[in-house]
Amino acid sequence: GGLVGSNGASFGGYSSIGGDIQNTYATGLVTATGASVEQTYAGGLLGANQIVVNYSYNNENPDSPLLEPLSGTVSNSFWNTETSGQTQGIGGFIAPNQEQFGDLSAEVLAQIDALKQVPESLKGITTAQMKQSSTFKEAGWDISNKGGDETVWRIYEGYTGPLLRDFLTKVDTSNSTSNITYDGKTHNLTLNGVEGLDSSKLLVGSGTDSARNAGNYKA
């Protein structure tokens, strides 16, 4: 998957439940190859979701153990249908069968089938939608397209996907304004003199520009 290969695992005849995947997105190309069918599951966000049956002792009927299907969940998440090459968010489901547990009741089988449904809150979107804050706000993300906000995520509208604000470097450019009297010449604009600014790491703009005509400009 674009974010997770397998949510949960099988080993030595036992299976483990995967975790809950929330407020995530993936944009990379996704392909899968392998010796088994499960290893070829390819999804825009998640390759395979493991479904396990929780086996517990039944005090009321010791000869009939309690079986409860469980799996990790995916919610409020996205994948890029254009860059991933995938039309589905989850490549497939790995579920227990009759050979592993004997005769599973119709109720348990129905619960397993219900866990195989791809949640509506896992959505495939375009590159343009990936760069719109409204896409993620509508899904309940703590996100803003304005600098200085205290949201978890920051997006540069029309330029980037969601970025974790804690990993961004804040730079104050408020004192970098220059006023030049019009003289008909071309003047260079630059932010390279701003303390703490590495223009090579700017997400929007280059930090330099030039202009000749009268007006307001920004680098």
Image (cartoon, rainbow, N blue to C red):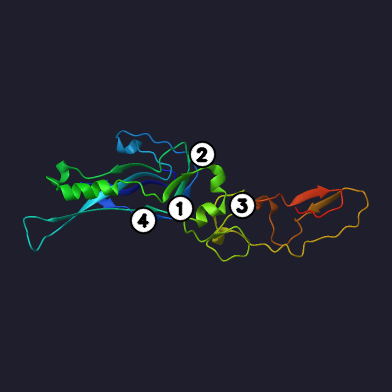
What is the crowding at mark 2: few (fewer than 14 residues within 10 Å), some, or many (at least 20)?
some
Give the residue at x 70% y 53%: 199
Horizontal side, residue 192 vs residue 69: left or right? right
- Determine contact: label 4, label 1, CB under 8 Å: no
Horizontal side, residue 107 vs residue 51: left or right? left
Query: Closer to the camera, 138 or 193?
Result: 138
**Mark 1, residue position:** 24
- Residue type beneath disc 3: Glu
**Mark 2, residue position:** 83
Q: Nearer the viewer, mark 3 or mark 4?
A: 3
- Whether residue 14 appears in this view of the structure is no
What's the distance in space between the residues labelled 3 and 4, CA to CA?
28 Å
What's the distance in space between the residues labelled 2 and 3, CA to CA?
19 Å
- Residue type beneath disc 4: Asp
Give the residue at x 39% y 38%: 42
What's the distance in space between the residues labelled 2 and 1, CA to CA?
16 Å
- Whether residue 68 appears in this view of the structure is yes
Disc nearer the start of the sequence (3/4): 4
- Identify whether 175 is placed above or below 102: below
Horizontal side, residue 61 vs residue 23: left or right? left
Disc nearer the start of the sequence (2/1): 1
Residue 74: x and y, percent? 38, 52
What's the distance in space between the residues labelled 4 and 1, CA to CA?
11 Å
Judged from the image, the secondary structure of the residue bearing numbered disc 1 is loop
**Mark 3, residue position:** 157
Judged from the image, the secondary structure of the residue bearing numbered disc 4 is loop
Name the image quarter holding the N terminus.
top left
Disc nearer the start of the sequence (2/3): 2
- Determine contact: label 2, label 1, CB under 8 Å: no
- Residue type beneath disc 2: Thr
Q: Nearer the viewer, mark 3 or mark 1?
A: 3
Residue 105: x and y, percent? 14, 48
